[in-house]
């Protein structure tokens, strides 16, 4: 499929400094902008040493410099996999980038070899390259195409699916010493929303494509793309094939590794996501040194806290990570952490949400003792947790339970039934609770996020053994107060949901 380039006269007002006012693709657009500028604005620009045209020329020169310096260190990567992975197809617009199916969207036969293409960043002159895990995972053969068109075989030194970061090394021919151009890693913590950003990669196989935009947001998480998410959002155009390419600042430093887009078509719609360079640096260093990633582990699951939950759990600042599950005999359990505690500080650092806590814990060293502050019943308590190394991947999948019997009458927009006997015979948990088999669209329960298949385990801290218990609760609950349900979704995920009562 050929994607025809469309380059319109696009005028953008994107401020990075007092001397950088706009960028444009055409001189006519620049003149149009100048004609509507107030005279005082033109005088101000001239007083600073240039006309609007001079500012445009300087901005263009800055982009020229980035492209000239960084492009030689950006490579194209092709990976052949003996068994195709449908999740790596470019067909799902919410997945990380992937090259669209070369068969024009036709479904490949099961177990057929797949061919993927992405980008990479040379960070060491001897051929060490950064890219995305989803570009090279399960690859039988990896080929790197350099800026000078040389094709070289490469091997995967290691990868981290949780952050979608991989390190690849070029296999140099015998007797050949590589001395490749490299890109410097910048400090992503210093990136500010509104800064200029430049993306380089191989969208749709078009190598060394350079696009520009700004930093749209920072700290994007809980998007369901990766297990560990702290994305930089940009509107610099990035498309399938840009995976593993750099996001750069105007100093030609890499501030992010492009990884995902949000789109309903599979193409770019102005929302792209990049992995912060500081995280990339940390993961890459550990892969190069040890070949694997080790993370800290507390043995708990948390969720973000909103206004309703903050009021219910008496958290004054409405910030923190609400503990929704505690692993039996895990580090958190041994430190006496409880379901319903809200973590507000970890190792002296403030915790604003569950993503921040996950990031702080993952950076902790196994065996270290970490002070943790929680709010319990409105009072701050200090815990001391001994961090362990994170175990291997566990099974976690959301699922739904089909109704097996005639449900009880609706309550608060919910249709409930008791837990089926099959649960007990199959060894499924819990065996007590109220099973939601229907949620009335438009009801407050629907708006609260409750779903068929959810099991209500507690309501305002009171155990719910069956559907009748919840019906009784709903009749007695304070409809003007804060009511919080403790719910299980799927096989083992438990969390709190503030219930928005019907008027």
Image (cartoon, grey):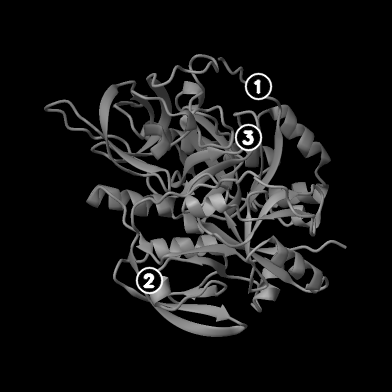
Can you tell which mark lies on residue 263? Answer: 3
Q: Sequence-wise, which precedes: disc 1 or disc 3?
A: 1
- In the figure, 387 relative to 397: above or below? below
- Image quadrant assignment for residue 1: top right
View extreme (right): residue: 503
Q: Residues within 10 Å of mark 3 (few under 14, many from 20)?
A: some
- In the figure, 6 relative to 472: above or below? above
- Whether residue 300 sits left or right of residue 479 in the image: it is left
Q: Sequence-wise, which precedes: disc 2 or disc 1?
A: 1
Q: To which residue does mark 2 refer?
A: 331
Q: Sequence-wise, which precedes: disc 2 or disc 3?
A: 3
- Whether residue 127 sits left or right of residue 394 in the image: it is left
Q: Secondary structure at mark 2?
A: helix
Query: x, y percentage for residue 497?
Result: 66, 62
Query: x, y percentage for residue 179?
Result: 24, 35
- Is there CB contact under 8 Å for labels 2 and 1? no
Q: To which residue does mark 1 refer?
A: 6
Q: Nearer the viewer, mark 1 or mark 3?
A: 3
CA gap, disc 1 and disc 3: 18 Å
Q: Nearer the viewer, mark 2 or mark 3?
A: 2
Q: Secondary structure at mark 3?
A: loop
Which residue is pictured at 36% across the width and 63% down the height?
296
CA gap, disc 2 and disc 3: 40 Å
Front in this rendered view, residue 428 or 64: 428
- Whether residue 27 sits left or right of residue 334 in the image: it is right
- Image quadrant assignment for residue 364: bottom left
């Amino acid at each position: 499929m050929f994607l025809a380039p469309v380059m319109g006269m696009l005028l953008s007002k994107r401020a990075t400094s007092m001397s950088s006012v706009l960028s444009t693709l055409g001189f006519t657009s620049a003149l149009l902008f100048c004609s509507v500028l107030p005279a005082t604005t033109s005088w101000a620009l001239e007083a600073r040493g240039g006309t609007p045209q001079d500012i445009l020329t300087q901005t263009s020169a800055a982009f020229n410099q980035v492209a000239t310096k960084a492009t030689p260190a950006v490579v194209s990567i092709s990976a052949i996999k003996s068994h195709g992975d449908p999740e790596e197809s470019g067909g799902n617009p919410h997945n990380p980038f992937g090259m669209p199916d070369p068969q024009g969207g036709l479904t490949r036969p099961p177990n057929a070899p797949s061919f993927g293409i992405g980008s990479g960043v040379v960070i060491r002159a001897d051929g060490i390259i950064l890219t995305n895990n989803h570009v090279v995972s399960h690859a039988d053969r990896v080929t790197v195409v350099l800026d000078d068109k040389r094709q070289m075989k490469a091997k995967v030194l290691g990868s981290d699916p949780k952050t979608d970061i991989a390190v690849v090394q070029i296999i140099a021919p015998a007797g050949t010493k590589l001395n490749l151009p490299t890109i410097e890693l910048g400090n992503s913590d210093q990136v500010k929303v509104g800064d200029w950003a430049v993306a380089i990669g191989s969208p749709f196989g078009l190598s060394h494509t350079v696009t520009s935009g700004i930093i749209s947001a920072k700290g994007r998480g809980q998007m369901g793309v990766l297990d560990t998410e702290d994305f930089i959002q940009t509107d610099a155009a990035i498309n399938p094939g840009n995976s593993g390419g750099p996001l750069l600042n105007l100093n030609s430093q890499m501030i992010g590794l492009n990884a995902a887009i949000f789109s309903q078509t599979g193409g770019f719609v102005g929302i792209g996501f990049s992995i912060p360079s500081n995280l990339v640096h940390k993961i890459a260093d550990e892969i190069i040194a040890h070949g694997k990633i080790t993370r800290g582990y507390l043995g708990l699951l948390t969720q973000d806290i909103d206004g309703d939950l903050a009021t219910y759990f008496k958290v004054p600042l409405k910030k923190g990570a609400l503990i929704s599950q505690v692993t039996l005999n895990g580090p958190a359990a041994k430190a006496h952490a409880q379901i319903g505690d809200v973590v507000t500080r970890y190792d002296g650092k403030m915790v604003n949400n569950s993503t921040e806590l996950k990031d702080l814990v993952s950076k902790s060293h196994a065996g270290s003792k970490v002070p943790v502050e929680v709010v319990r019943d409105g009072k701050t308590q200090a815990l001391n947790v001994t961090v362990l190394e994170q175990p291997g991947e566990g099974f976690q999948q959301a699922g739904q339970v089909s109704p097996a019997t005639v449900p009880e009458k609706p309550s608060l927009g919910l249709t409930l039934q008791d837990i089926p006997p099959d649960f007990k015979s199959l060894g499924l948990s819990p065996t007590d609770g109220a099973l939601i088999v229907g949620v009335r669209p438009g009801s407050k329960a629907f708006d609260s996020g409750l779903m068929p298949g959810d099991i209500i385990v507690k309501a305002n801290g009171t155990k719910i053994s069956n559907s009748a218990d919840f019906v009784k609760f709903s009749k007695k609950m304070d409809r003007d107060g804060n009511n919080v349900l403790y719910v299980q979704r799927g096989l083992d995920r438990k969390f709190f949901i503030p219930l928005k009562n019907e008027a």
